[in-house]
Amino acid sequence: MSLHESLTKMVDFDQQSFFVSAAAIAFNPTFWNIVARREYRTKFLTRLFGGNSQAACYALAATIFSLGLIRDFLYERALRDQPSHPALEEPLVKYVAYVLLAVGNIFVISSTWQLGITGTFLGDYFGILMDDIVTGFPFNITNAPMYYGSTMSFLGTALLYGKPAGILLTLHVLLVYLTAIRFENPFTAAIYAKRDRERAKATGKSVESKKEL
Ligand SMILES: *[C@@H]1O[C@H](CO)[C@@H](O)[C@H](O)[C@H]1NC(C)=O
């Protein structure tokens, strides 16, 4: 049996919900990157909130969070429409699923705790920068705990339901997030590099003015 044949036996590609879920997974990071970069260039959201960048960022955070809930709902619905695989019904697989869900959620929750709402939800594009790079847990394990934690939760859910289609959708999640990381990290680094240059200039100036005194 070819890979294609065995895959089509394990995953029902006739289910529309599978593709709706895949589209929702790809849509979310695309949406927040387009909105955040536009905010960075034009401040359109901050202006919409009367110049309050904090409020604008919270509104985007609430939107991204809601889109995440919809995406999770569509993923679970897609899994329900898919066949299970006997090999994934083993107790060991369920055990691995619970570990993945637990670790995934610990990564997501602890990184939100470390970064705060604006730090988690693209505050840097609104000019709300962190004072220092966060290096504590979970950032001492991975530089993208949010993305890897979320990926683990997707895989955990797939294994819990015993659905090969979920594993395939998790691979899609991973690809989408790896693309997002490659797209976002240089931009965020550039925002902070600019801030550091401005800071260095400012302290340089204050040192100079002290010398004048
Ligand atoms: C990361 O930080 C946590 C909490 O401070 C600590 O328990 C853990 O050992 C650290 N892990 C690594 C790989 O440094």
Image (cartoon, helix red, strand yellow):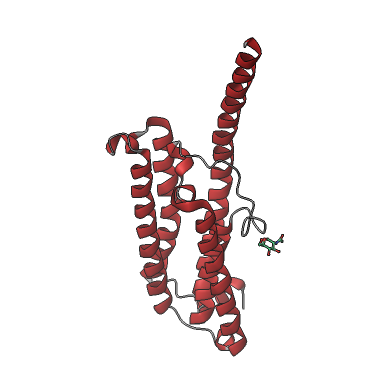
Counting every numbered tag in the picture gives 0
State which quarter of the image contains the C terminus. Answer: top right
Residue 172 in sight: no
User: What residue lies at 43% left-to-right and 75% top-to-bottom?
Assistant: 79
Direction front: furthest residue: 213
State which quarter of the image contains the N terminus. Answer: bottom right
User: What residue lies at 57% left-to-right and 34% top-to-bottom?
Assistant: 190
User: What residue lies at 53% left-to-right and 84% top-to-bottom?
Assistant: 85
Nearer-the-camera pick, 65 or 173: 65
The percent coordinates of residue 148 (x first, y second) are: 58, 61
Asked if residue 142 lies left or right of residue 156, the reply is right
Nearer-the-camera pick, 57 or 84: 57
The percent coordinates of residue 183 (x first, y second) are: 55, 43
The percent coordinates of residue 75 (x first, y second) are: 42, 69
User: What residue lies at 55% left-to-right and 67% top-to-bottom?
Assistant: 106
Instruction: Give the quarter of the image for residue 17.
Output: bottom left
Asked if residue 68 lies left or right of residue 92, the reply is left
Indicate whether 129 appears above or below 65: above
Indicate whether 194 appears above or below 112: above
Q: Quadrant of ligand 1?
A: bottom right
Direction top: furthest residue: 212
Indicate whether 161 appears above or below 143: below
